[in-house]
Image: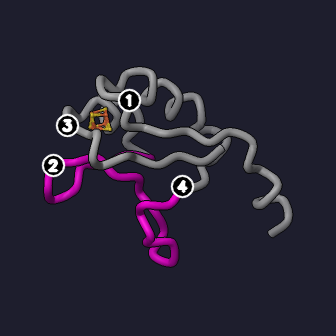
């Protein structure tokens, strides 16, 4: 599973960061972004989510009032191939 935040839709309510602080954080502009490793800084791209965090990410997406959190299921083969 991969996730990204559509910053044009985010209103900075903080719900996602409360539900899943391991994945979402509010940036300096008060908008949510997905925490990424240094080597993966293109924040407009989908970011892989660890298995143990996927339920929280789904909860966060369900709780987002603007639908700004986009989830892409079924991208696991990339990780397995690595
Ligand atoms: S829940 Fe949605 S609107 Fe609220 S901070 Fe997260 S992405 Fe933005």
Magenta span main SS: loop
The answer to whether the beta carbon of the residue marked 4 is less than 8 Å from any atom of ligand 1 is no
Alpha-carbon span between mark 4 and mark 3: 19 Å
Label at residue 46: 4
Q: Which residue lies at the image location 58% right of the left edge and 28% below the top edge?
A: 55
Residue 1 drawn at (x, y percent): 66, 43
Q: Which of marks 3 and 1 is nearer the N terminus?
A: 3
Circle 3 sits on which residue? 11
Q: Nearer the viewer, mark 3 or mark 2?
A: 3
Which quarter of the rendered picture does the C terminus lie within? bottom right
Give the answer, above or below, for where 50 lies relative to 29: above
Name the secondary structure under disc 4. Answer: loop
Q: Give the range drawn in magenta.
A: 23-45
**Ligand 1 visible in quadrant:** top left
Cα separation, mark 3 vs mark 2, equals 8 Å
Disc with the residue nearer the chain's start (1 vs 4): 4
Q: Distance between the residues labelled 2 and 1?
A: 17 Å
5 with respect to 78 (left or right):
left
Label 3 – label 1 distance at C-alpha:
10 Å
Percent x, y of residue 34: 41, 52
Q: Residue at label 1?
A: 67
Label 2 belongs to which residue?
30
Task: Return the disc, 3 or 2, that comes first in the chain's sequence.
Answer: 3
- Classify 10 Å Cα crowding around label 1: few (below 14), some (14-19), many (20 and above): some
């Amino acid at each position: 599973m991969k996730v990204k935040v559509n910053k044009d839709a985010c209103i900075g309510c903080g719900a996602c960061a409360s539900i899943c602080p391991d994945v979402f954080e509010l940036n300096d502009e008060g908008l949510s972004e997905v925490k990424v490793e240094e080597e993966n800084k293109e924040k407009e791209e989908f970011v892989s989510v660890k298995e143990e965090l996927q339920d929280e990410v789904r909860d966060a997406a369900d709780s987002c009032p603007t639908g700004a959190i986009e989830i892409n299921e079924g991208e696991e083969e990339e990780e397995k191939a690595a």
